[in-house]
Image (cartoon, grey):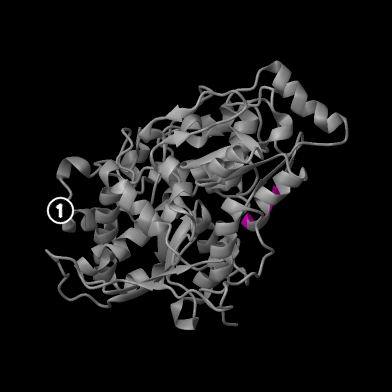
Amino acid sequence: MTKFSDQFSRRKFIVTAGASAVSSILLKGCLGNPPEPGATDAAGGEIPAGTSPVAVPNEKRVEGIESTKITLGYIPIVEAAPLIIAQEKGFFAKYGMTDVKVAKQANWGSARDNVEIGSAGGGIDGGQWQMPMPYLISKGLITKNKAGIPMYVLAQLNTQGNGIAIASKHEGKGLGLKLDKAAQDYILGLKKAGTPFKAAYTFPKVNQDLWLRYWLAANNINPDADVELLTVPAAQTVANMKTGSMDGFSTGDPWPLRIVKEKIGFMSALTAEMWKGHPEEYLAIRGDWVDKHPKATEALLAGLIEAQQWCDKPEHRAELVAIVSGKGFFDVPSEVLTPSYEGKYVMGDSKPDINDFKMGPLYWNDGVGNVSYPYASHDLWFLTESIRWGFLPTKTLADKKTLIGKVNRADIWKKAAKLAGVADADIPKSTSRGIEKFFDGTEFNPDKPEAYLKSLAIKKV
């Protein structure tokens, strides 16, 4: 039988529109109530996109590089750290990408809109994405005019750094990683009482939505029938939970610290508990840009890989926090970011605190595989899970080899890894990480995605 691992060898928007609003939201969101959408900085202006500094020593500029310029969008959360570090520490410039702009995006919808028009139209060439957004954009399923914009997935940016937060009014009800019968009945009882449990995410049909759905379904709660799932702008999530209009949300670092510290809620689970070393967010770039600039793409990835290796060293975390927390990037006090970067989580609701560096965000080595390498098997899980909830047609699995082969460019990652001097032992030999295991005992075998779907009790297919 052929294994999955053997199949895959290979209109005008302002980019920074809302950047100052996001900075203000993050700052006030960690210290007080988030402002209304559309808020600006004190000067009423925009925070410009950062640009790569002069190359660091030991530069390895790529010969014949087609361009030194690219504009990459990012959302100011821990997943973006490698892009920011690659720029600020000169790793991009080291390989000749001396004019990389990392442009803060107001939200995921803005990032999608900006990649649709491209940097030539004032947008972006690619950047940070929840999965499977690159696939949805490629197929034109979420673009504004429904036209497909071919995207290439080039690297995974990180693993972990997410969790599920629950409002404090539900303390003492047993809403943790695993729900016993009483906890399940409690959530089901809310629906019967006409006050269904409401949980939110910031963009539909991608990571945060999928983490919520998996957690609920694994605990015998049907996310489409027993609760209400909502798309809520990031600026409103914490405020909505505080006012009681939302019962929970799928959230990323550094929000958990504020939620528990201000007694707004507690953490039912970290995604690191749900699926150790799970795929989180990715670097994906427009296919036309990559096709036109193959050497520049390799240079860019080599710089990113070095940045990810740098980010993963515990001795660098203090400097990482100092950089990304700055006014030009996340614009939050460093103490807001430090705990999660040390793997320290106060869970709340009488749950034991977590103090484990490997439970926080990781960028290069998670003990399971290579974090940066874009395993095609992970893409397949996202696609399979999307089929599970009716987001993609079941025929997607029949076309999986062609679809993933067009979007996932692990072959370019491998070339960049060699350019960056990554040891052969650290370059995955297979495009599959193998069988994945989840907290509820479910297993995903990428060679048998249909069997995985069949095994799931709660689904829409």
Looking at the rendering, the stretch of residues picked out in magenta corresponds to: 230-234
The total of numbered circles placed on residues is 1
Relative to 120, residue 229 above or below: above
Percent of width and height locating residue 303: 25, 61
Q: Is residue 394 visible?
A: no
Percent of width and height locating residue 56: 18, 66
What is the crowding at mark 1: few (fewer than 14 residues within 10 Å), some, or many (at least 20)?
few
> In this view of the protein, which residue sits in the foreground, 378 or 186?
186
> In this view of the protein, which residue sits in the foreground, 414 or 461?
414
Relative to 453, residue 149 above or below: below
| Residue named by callout 1 | 421
- Residue drawn where x is 71% and y is 44% of the image: 241
Extreme top residue here?
181
Extreme left residue here?
58
Pick the quarter of the image with the C terminus. Answer: top right
Relative to 165, residue 207 above or below: below
* SS state under label 1: loop
Residue 216, image quadrant: top right
Percent of width and height locating residue 140: 57, 64
- Residue drawn where x is 17% and y is 58% of the image: 419
Residue 375, image quadrant: top left
Pick the quarter of the image with the N terminus. Answer: top left
- Residue drawn where x is 51% and y is 42% of the image: 162
> In this view of the protein, which residue sits in the foreground, 142 or 394?
142
Q: Is residue 47 visible?
A: yes
> In this view of the protein, which residue sits in the foreground, 419 or 402?
419
Whether the magenta-drawn stretch holds residue 452 is answered as: no
Query: The residue under label 1 is which amino acid type?
Result: Gly
